[in-house]
């Protein structure tokens, strides 16, 4: 095949813009076609757009490798996962967040092996996640996401038949206030408030109830008891929630609703590498489009 036939008539900025609109503004192929036609007079087929994405996929491998290296040296890691579709099958978008890196990965599995493969034996000082079993046991200490338990407590407060849900809800309100103010508090104050919270939590857990919803809530909190206030021992370094991971996954959730998934595994892997590069660069203050353009033109 002649060399000219193997190239592309589109420059780096067109490639970067297509990637930016697809991955960051969550455009579908049809909307991308409309944007390029209306703004630039470019009539692009969906096949041409796919070839753009496939052609540029390898350029984000280096950024992903750098982010992985930073993640595997992190002291605090937050992790979450959400469902997705790849090649018509159920799959999962995983995200791993630290202060210096955000790593996305698309896998067909939701098992703990994904964490083992990603972390490559590194055990951070603190692991932040929800109570899903595959998220347990990956750090020296664990911080359970309080937002998940708080949502359950509010549901029980509204739908339960006693006051257990409300008592737990008020307890979480106090815990969130401590998490919000902890960086400005003296160590002795944090210690005293933590002790008071644990004392009151144990009193709630010792309560008896005939409400099934309340019993389930107490059981969840009882199992997570030793992971609930870990953030108190790492003032300003460990969040009480896993919101950072949920925010990192939100674009993937929206895109799932827009496109219903990926037709090929390479596309899911390529977008995960792109998101990894962009989200990690964002931590250093770089904008998504210029990060993508820099990778494409490198």
Image (cartoon, rainbow, N blue to C red):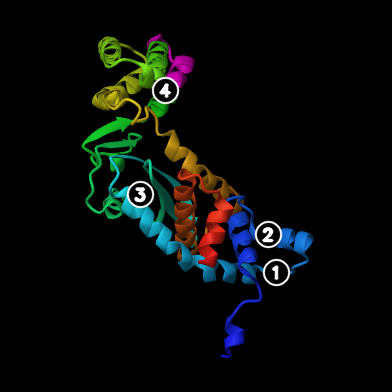
Measured Cα–Cα span from mark 3 to mark 2: 32 Å
Measured Cα–Cα span from mark 1 to mark 3: 37 Å
Q: Residues within 10 Å of mark 2 (few under 14, many from 20)?
A: many
Measured Cα–Cα span from mark 4 to mark 1: 48 Å
| Residue tagged 3 | 110
Q: Is residue 179 visible?
A: yes
Q: Which mark is residue 44?
A: 1
As for residue 160 lying within the magenta part, the answer is yes
Q: In percent of the image, x 27 and y 17: which residue is there?
A: 187
Mark toward the viewer: 1 or 3: 1
Measured Cα–Cα span from mark 4 to mark 3: 24 Å
Mark toward the viewer: 4 or 1: 1
Q: Residues within 10 Å of mark 1 (few under 14, many from 20)?
A: some
Residue interval drawn in magenta: 153-164
Q: Is residue 278 above or below residue 87?
A: above
Q: Nearer the viewer, residue 205 or 117?
A: 117
Q: Earlier in the sequence, mark 4 or mark 1?
A: 1
Q: Are marks 1 and 3 in contact (CB under 8 Å)?
A: no
Q: Is residue 75 above or below residue 86?
A: above
Q: Earlier in the sequence, mark 1 or mark 2?
A: 2
Please state the horizontal and vertical placement of residue 279, each as a whole percent of the image. 47, 48
Please state the horizontal and vertical placement of residue 281, each as a whole percent of the image. 47, 50
Mark toward the viewer: 4 or 2: 2
| Residue tagged 2 | 32
């Amino acid at each position: 095949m002649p060399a000219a036939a193997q190239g592309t008539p589109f420059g780096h900025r067109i490639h970067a813009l297509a990637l930016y609109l697809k991955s960051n503004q969550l455009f579908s192929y049809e909307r991308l076609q409309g944007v390029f036609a209306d703004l630039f007079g470019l009539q692009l087929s969906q096949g041409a757009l796919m070839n753009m994405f496939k052609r540029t996929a390898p350029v984000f491998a280096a950024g992903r490798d750098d982010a992985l290296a930073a993640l595997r040296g992190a002291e605090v890691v937050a992790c979450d996962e959400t469902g997705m579709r790849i090649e018509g099958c159920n799959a999962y978008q995983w995200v791993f967040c630290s202060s210096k890196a955000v790593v996305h990965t698309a896998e067909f599995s939701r098992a703990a092996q994904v964490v083992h493969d990603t972390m490559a034996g590194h055990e951070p000082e603190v692991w932040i996640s929800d109570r899903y079993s595959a998220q347990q046991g990956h750090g020296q200490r664990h911080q359970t996401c309080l937002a998940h338990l708080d949502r359950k407590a509010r549901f029980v407060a509204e739908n339960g038949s006693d006051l257990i849900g409300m008592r737990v809800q008020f307890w979480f309100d106090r815990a969130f206030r401590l998490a919000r103010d902890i960086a400005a508090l003296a160590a002795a104050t944090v210690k005293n408030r933590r002790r008071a919270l644990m004392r009151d939590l144990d009193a709630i857990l010792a309560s008896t109830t005939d409400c099934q919803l309340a019993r389930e809530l107490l059981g969840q909190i009882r199992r997570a008891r030793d992971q609930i206030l870990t953030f108190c021992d790492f003032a300003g370094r460990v969040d009480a929630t896993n919101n950072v991971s949920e925010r990192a996954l939100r674009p993937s959730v929206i895109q799932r609703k827009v496109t219903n998934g990926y037709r090929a595994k390479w596309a899911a892997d390529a977008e995960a590498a792109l998101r990894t590069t962009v989200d990690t660069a964002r931590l250093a203050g770089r904008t998504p489009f210029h990060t993508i353009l820099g990778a494409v033109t490198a």
